[in-house]
Amino acid sequence: MSVGELAGLLVAVFWAVLVTLLAVVLVRLSRVLREAAALVSAVTEQAVPLLVDAGSAVRSANEQLERVDEITANVQDAAANANALSSTVAATLGGPLVKVAAFSYGVRKAVAKQNGTPPLPQQPGEREALARLVRAEVRAATAPRGGLLSRVRRAVRG
C-alpha cells in the first residue's frame, strides 16, 4: 500500500465517521422537531378553547357593564325625581306648617297669660330648643313616609 492509498483510506474513514456523526445528529434533531410539533399542536388544541372562553367572558362582562350603566342612569333619574318631589312637598306644606306652628305658639302663649300659668320659655337656650322641636315637627310632618325617597334612604342605610 502506498502513501497515497493510505491517505485516501484515511480520508474515506474520516468522511465515513463524519457522515455517521451527522446522521446521528440529524436523527436526534428530527426527534426534537417531532416533539416540538406535537407540543405546538397540543398547545394550539388547548389554547383555542381558552381563547373562545375568554372572548365569551369579555362579551358577558360588557353586557353586564351595559346593564349596570342603565341601572345607574335609572337610579340617578329616581334620585332626581325624589329630590324634586321632596322640594315640592317642602315648599307646598312647609310654609303653611310653620305658620300653623307659629300660630299655635302664639295661642299657647296668650292662653298661658290669661290663665296665669308661667309663659313659655324666655331664656335664649330654651327658645332655641323650642325652635328645634318645632323644626323637627315640621320636618316629620312634611317628610313622605312610604315614598321613594324614604325607601332609597332606608336602602342606603342598610
Image (tube, grey):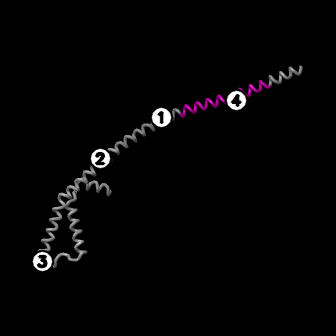
Numbered range of the magenta stretch? 14-43
Q: Nearer the viewer, mark 2 or mark 1?
A: 2
Residue at 20% x, 55% y is 88
Which residue matches tag 2? 74
Which residue matches tag 4? 25
Residue 36 within the segment the image draws in magenta: yes
Residue 103 within the segment the image draws in magenta: no
Residue 130: quadrant of the picture:
bottom left
- Residue 2 in the image: state x and y as whole percent: 89, 20
Mark 1 or 3 closer to N-term?
A: 1
Q: Which secondary structure, mark 1? A: helix
Whole-angstrom CA distance, mark 1 to mark 4, is 37 Å
Mark 4 or 3 closer to N-term?
A: 4
Which residue matches tag 3? 113
Mark 1 or 4 closer to N-term?
A: 4
- Residue 122 in the image: state x and y as whole percent: 20, 77
Q: Which secondary structure, mark 3? A: helix
- Mark 3 Cα-neighbour bin, 10 Å: few <14, some 14–19, many ≥20: few
Q: What residue type is labelled 1?
A: Pro
Which residue matches tag 1? 49
- Residue 28 in the image: state x and y as whole percent: 67, 30
